[in-house]
Amino acid sequence: MTQVYFSPQDQVLKRIKEAIDGASRSLEVAMYVFTAAYLSKALVAAHRRGVAVRVILDRKEARRSSSRARELLEAGVPTRFLRPVRRGLFHHKFLLVDGQTAITGSGNFTNDMGWRNFEATLFLEEPEFLSRFQEEFDRLWNLASLELSGTQKRARGSSTPGIRSRRGRVVRGHQEE
């Protein structure tokens, strides 16, 4: 079944958060811009309750101070970064919930998407769509880098790459296990 919602009138951010909160197995996010603390906190909470969470973000956008990338990394959420070649954008906007629902549309995970912008969001449950989104996520996860900054930092005594957080701590990158 497909459901279609429009921002701002259909409370899309609330619906996305409810989907995240209801996940029991997995959450996979591919997002160009991610600045909504409301959703990043929900992903961190899901990670802490044992849901397998993976996030891919556009590297350039993730470096912005408003991005939730560092918050996700500091919480231990496996997060990777992609920067296409030839001045392209990593412009995907989708979330996979438990392999049962794909949430996609015109909006990024920003407060403006939910409260100001006119956006369309689809909640898809058809197996043929889900398999295509899963294939794309897995393909991009394998292409994406653990590096947020241009230079890779390594934690003392570790071969695991990481980045410096805003507090100066080294935050280790996350490999899929």
Image (cartoon, grey):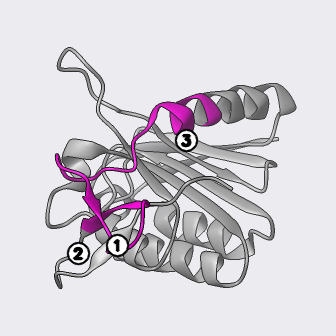
Q: Which residue is mark 3?
A: 104
Q: Are marks 1 and 2 in contact (CB under 8 Å)?
A: yes
Dot 3 or dot 1, earlier in sequence: 3
Is 109 placed left or right of 17 in the picture? left
Measured Cα–Cα span from mark 3 to mark 1: 29 Å
Q: Are marks 3 and 2 in contact (CB under 8 Å)?
A: no
What's the residue at 43%, 35% (across, down)? Answer: 92
Of circles 3 and 1, the one toward us is: 1
Measured Cα–Cα span from mark 1 to mark 2: 6 Å
Is 132 placed left or right of 15 in the picture? right
The stretch in magenta equals: 138-163
Residue 33, above or below 46: above
Please rate how many residues cluster around mark 3, counting C-alpha atoms within 10 Å: few if below 14, some from 14 to 19, many from 20: many
Q: Which residue is mark 1?
A: 171
Tell me the element at label 3: strand
The disc placed on residue 165 is 2
What's the residue at 42%, 60% (across, down)? Answer: 159
